[in-house]
Amino acid sequence: MNTSDTYKTNEPQIKYKPLSLEEERIGKAVVHAAFQVHKALGPGLLERVYEVCIQHVLMNSGFDVKRQVEVPIVYEDQVFEEGFKLDILVNDLVICELKAIDNVNPVWEAQLLSHLRLTKKRLGYIINFNVPLIKHGIKRMVL
């Protein structure tokens, strides 16, 4: 019996391109920054407080960090400036959507996936700071 036959299933094989080393490096830094900020401030503050603090930590680590990045929408060859905003964009590669809410909303994942697709980025994070342990508030998504 061929060993490759042993692992065959009827499931379609998902093929994806691995993230770049730079995307992975930024991702680790984002998670580390979230842990630092949450440890220092705890839950219960406004989203914008966490946003400026995450930006500060990442910038001090040498990253280019932009807040509230406006992204226009292109639809039927028209550019509409009334698009959406990214909470945080790191090195023009990784999107971070920050939350400070009690109830997790499943639409956040759909929104982040749309943001990744529309900006042609591959890695994004949803980080909800309103949790007792930050590890329960971090969701990593890859396209």
Image (cartoon, grey):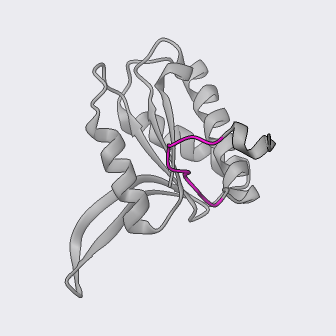
Quarter occupied by residue 83: bottom left
Give coordinates of residue 105: x percent, y percent. Answer: 27, 30
The residue positioned farthest toward the front in the image shown: 1
Range shown magenta: 8-17
Rendered residue at 31%/25% (across/down): 104
Q: Nearer the viewer, residue 91 or 12?
A: 12
Q: Is residue 83 left or right of residue 109?
A: left
Residue at 76% over, 56% down: 21
Residue occupying the far bottom of the picture:
77
x, y percentage for residue 97? 42, 44
Quadrant occupied by the N terminus: top right
Residue 8 x %, y %: 63, 42
Reply above or below: 46 against 103. Answer: below
When the figure is inspected, residue 80 is found, relative to residue 93, above or below; the finding is below
Question: What secondary structure characterizes most of the magenta part?
Answer: loop
Left or right of residue 124, residue 28 in this image? right
The answer to which of 134 and 44 lies nearer the viewer is 134
Residue at image position (68%, 38%) is 7
Residue pictured at 37% horizontal, 66% vertical: 118
Q: Is residue 26 magenta?
A: no
Query: 22 or 38: which is nearer to us?
Result: 22
Number of callouts? 0
The percent coordinates of residue 132 (x first, y second) are 48, 11
| Residue 13 belongs to magenta span | yes
- Extreme top residue here? 132
Vertical placement of 63 versus 130: above or below?
Answer: below
Q: Nearest the camera: 111 or 60?
A: 111
